[in-house]
Image (cartoon, helix red, strand yellow):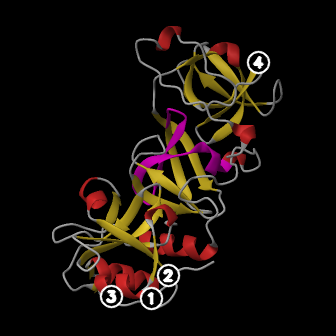
Amino acid sequence: MNSSKKVIRVVISAALAASMLLPSAFALYPATVKADALYLRQSPGGAIITTLPQNTTLAVIDNSSEWYQVVVNGKEGYVSGAYLAGSPNCDFTIGSGKVVCDTIVNLREQPNMSAKILSTMPNGASVSAVGVENGWYKVVYNGVSGYMHPDYLVLSASENSGVAGAVTNTAATGLSTKRAEVLAYAAQFLGTPYVYGGSTPSGFDCSGFTSYVMKNTITSIPRVAQDQFDNLTRVSRSELLPGDLVFFGSSAYSISHVGLYVGDNQFIHSPHTGDVVKYDSLTGTYDTRFQGGARVIFD
């Protein structure tokens, strides 16, 4: 992760908000204007962009000096930190932005690295930033609301601000273009219904989904889960990379399910009748029934 933008996660309780000390430099957190009005300036002490009324909520992205770098209503600028107070608010208007990364960034259900993955966002993806919580941006991407790490979002008003850093998200670190393409291609089918015997975007079963994704991105693989497991190059759980296949069953000779590993102990799959293509964690029954992985992408 870009060390020049170290993120310090701060949990703010409503009871402490009124007396809370502001977080350390380079923290991403919400704050409110406590003066009657406060100028938003182009640079520290520079030209005035607009006037912020009392109780305006904004996102602080750098408080390393008396002039705080902030974002509010799609505008980035500087304000005097003496007139801000930390706020428990999460949801407020920040502005639109773009994902900046080498490959992909995960959109998560909660603002932490262990939370469920809701979607993956490729470099250049457009999002709406609608809040800040625990040092993460709350964003909306393709109609899905979730959280993303601030190192990978550049707001439209600040494309040269340097807020975005190099990708270090576990599911994205060091990914080749091929692996990133496979994960992004698979993600577009999130919500597609499970259909027994299905192998098209109108409906997939588990191996129908993995074979369709691989056929349309890398190469054709066997159609049935057991055949995929038997004929592809095996990898252990510790060797899994995003884009590898993961297999489940009562034994290596009775494979009943397959999915596509995305990193962070998560995989995308078409689970069973009545469900849809979605992300799941390699925990619980998936952990106990895990039989191994297989590699299709060699880079």
Indicate the secondary structure of the residue bearing disc 1.
helix
Residue 3, image x, y percentages: 73, 40
- Identity of the amino acid at label 1? Lys
Dot 1: within a 10 Å radius of its alpha carbon, few (fewer than 14), some, or many (20 or more) residues?
Answer: few
Of tags 2 and 1, which is closer to the observer? 2
Tag 3: amino acid = Asp
The disc placed on residue 296 is 2
Q: Mark 4 or mark 2, which is nearer to you? A: 2
Mark nearer the N terminus (3 vs 1):
1
Mark positioned earlier in the residue sequence (3 or 2): 3
Give coordinates of residue 102: x percent, y percent. Answer: 66, 62
Residue at which label 3 appears: 227
- Marker disc for residue 215: 1
Please tell me how crowded label 2 is: few (under 14), some (14-19), or many (20+) other residues with Cα within 10 Å. some
Mark pair 1, 4: CA separation: 56 Å
Are the residues tagged 2 and 1 within 8 Å (C-beta)?
A: no
Q: CA distance from mark 2 to mark 1?
A: 11 Å
Give the residue at x 21% y 66%. Answer: 275
**CB atoms of marks 1 and 4 within 8 Å:** no
Q: Real-space Cα distance between discs 4 and 2? A: 53 Å
- At label 4, the amino acid type is Glu
The answer to whether residue 256 is left or right of residue 201 is: left
